[in-house]
Image (tube, rainbow, N blue to C red):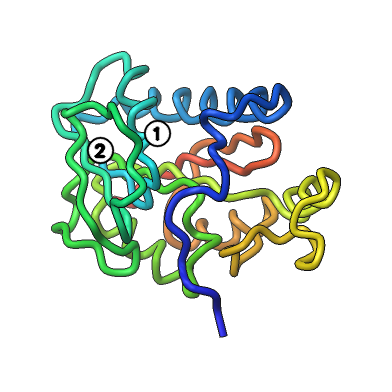
Amino acid sequence: MPEPNVVGNHYDKYGTRNPIARRLMAGFLRSAVELYGEVEPASVLEVGCGEGRLAQHLLAHARRPPERFEACDLSLERLAPGLSERIHFREASVEALPYADGQFELVVCCEVLEHVPHPAAALVELRRVARRAVLLSTPREPLWRALNLARGKYLRALGNTPGHVQHFSRRGLLRLVEPVLHVRRVRTPLPWTMLLADVPR
């Protein structure tokens, strides 16, 4: 039976003092900002926002700030303090988003699909509410688990992070996405796969 979905991170990856982890996160954020900038959306929805740190970072680094930025997760109990008042937060599941078809120019969904039991159905829901593009990322397997084992984490689970019920290689994520969206860009900031995909017209 699948583990329940997990909200947020098991450790503060955005605020970590570990120099290696900080370098990895810098690469992740750099790729996210780059792909976000290719769209320059007027309206944004982040699905699975966790602590809200990615939404805050994208908003702070947008060349042209969006007119509307919404973010949702199963629970908002772990939101970080000091987030921008321009981000409107709401409780919602990726599997049943309470938004109209094509309501947002860009939908961002990073570090979420590995937590859901039916990622293909979740992807269809992301496409439904996106008008122009979807920005996705997942941990890159088996590298992700190998790095966990190398740092002595989750040994009994063979390096699997708690809450991860799906495991995507770069190719595996593309196989999931390509029947639903047109992949425009693929980035591989260690140890993730991140892609920007257009909604078919």
Q: Which of the 4 quarters of the picture holds residue 190? A: top right
Furthest residue in direction bottom, as rendered: 1
Furthest residue in direction top, as rendered: 63
Q: What kind of element bears circle 1?
A: helix
Type of the residue with mark 2: Val
Is residue 198 in view from this perspective? no
Does the CB distance between marks 1 and 2 fall below 8 Å? no
Viewer-nearest residue: 48 or 101: 48
Q: Using the image, determine if residue 34 lies above or below residue 169.
A: above
- x, y percent for residue 175: 60, 61
Sequence-first tag of 1 and 2: 2
The residue at which mark 2 appears reads as: 44
Viewer-nearest residue: 132 or 45: 45
The residue at which mark 1 appears reads as: 53
Type of the residue with mark 1: Arg
Q: Using the image, determine if residue 102 lies above or below residue 98.
A: above
Picture residue at 37% right of the left edge, 17% below the top: 61
- x, y percent for residue 67: 14, 27
